[in-house]
Every structure is written in structure tokens, then in C-alpha cells.
Image (tube, rainbow, N blue to C red):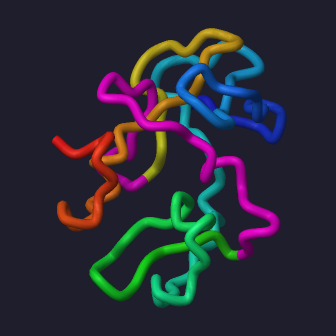
Amino acid sequence: MTMWTEFTFILQPSVLGGIGVFATHNIPINTKLFSDTFTLRTMKSANIPEAFKKYIIYLNDEECLCPERFDRMEIGWYINHSYQPNIQKNSDKHVVALRNINQGEEILIDYNCLNEPEHLKEDYYKR
């Protein structure tokens, strides 16, 4: 399986809005992406300022997963949603390319794979 490097992605403005993650080179199908040492922390969602809540993953009504530090978020927190994603978690919980991804293409994931409770999902990605 091909691996990514620290030079595989770059942050750029997205046509979907805000910032997105883009491929800096062609990425073959099944390439394992991102580090296995990605660090998450659990916090009370009530303790997170509203402006930062778009970068959390709800576990339940009170708790969420967050970046290790909001002032130094890893690039993965900027991946935008799509119902036609080009990456996904596989059965080993690794993130892999679903198909060949071209240089300059935005990296997209279906947020529904994050398994947030339905009533806590933002409207734009509810099924």
C-alpha cells in the first residue's frame, strides 16, 4: 500500500466554502493517508466556544472529540464533506483513497462515517 508524506496535502480556499485540503500530487487508489498518531481529546461540548464547534465530532449530547489543540489543528480537521467522497476509513480504521485522486483535487469525506448522533449533525450532511 502506498503511503502519504507530509508534502501530500495543502490547505487552500475551497469552492465548497472556507478552507479545504487539496492533493499536491496524484494519489493512487488505496493509498493510506494521514498519520496513525493523530491525537484526539474528549471535551465537554458546552466548554467549546461556538466558533470552534465546526471542528468537533459529537459523541453524544455532552461530549465531543476535538483536536489536541485548536490553535494547531492537523490538516485533517479541514477536510470537507461530500456524498461522493474520494477518501474513507477502511475496516482497519485507516483513511484511504477510494479512487485515484488527481493533483489539485480537493480531498473529501462523507461526514456520516463519523458516526455522530443524528440529532447533533449539521443539516447540510444529514441523510
**Is 36 on the left or on the right of 118, as rendered?**
right
60 in relation to 10, above or below: below
**Is 30 on the left or on the right of 127, as rendered?**
right
The quadrant where residue 105 appears: top right
Residue positioned 28% across, 80% down in the render: 60
Residue positioned 53% across, 67% down in the render: 53
**Is 28 on the left or on the right of 116, as rendered?**
right
Residue positioned 61% across, 29% down in the render: 2
Q: Is residue 87 magenta?
A: yes
Where residue 97 sits in the image (x, y, percent)?
Answer: 48, 28
Where residue 39 sits in the image (x, y, percent)?
Answer: 63, 72
Magenta span: 69-93
58 in relation to 110, above or below: below
76 in relation to 107, above or below: below
The quarter in which the N terminus is drawn is: top right
The quarter in which the C terminus is drawn is: top left
Out of 47 and 75, give the one closest to the viewer: 47
Where residue 84 sits in the image (x, y, percent)?
Answer: 33, 22
Residue positioned 61% across, 10% down in the render: 102
The quadrant where residue 50 appears: bottom right
**Is 75 on the left or on the right of 52, as rendered?**
right
Q: Is residue 125 magenta?
A: no
Out of 59 and 45, give the one closest to the viewer: 45
Residue located farthest toward the front when viewing the structure as drawn:
50
The count of marks equals 0
33 in relation to 85, above or below: below
Out of 49 and 4, give the one closest to the viewer: 49
Where residue 40 sits in the image (x, y, percent)?
Answer: 58, 74
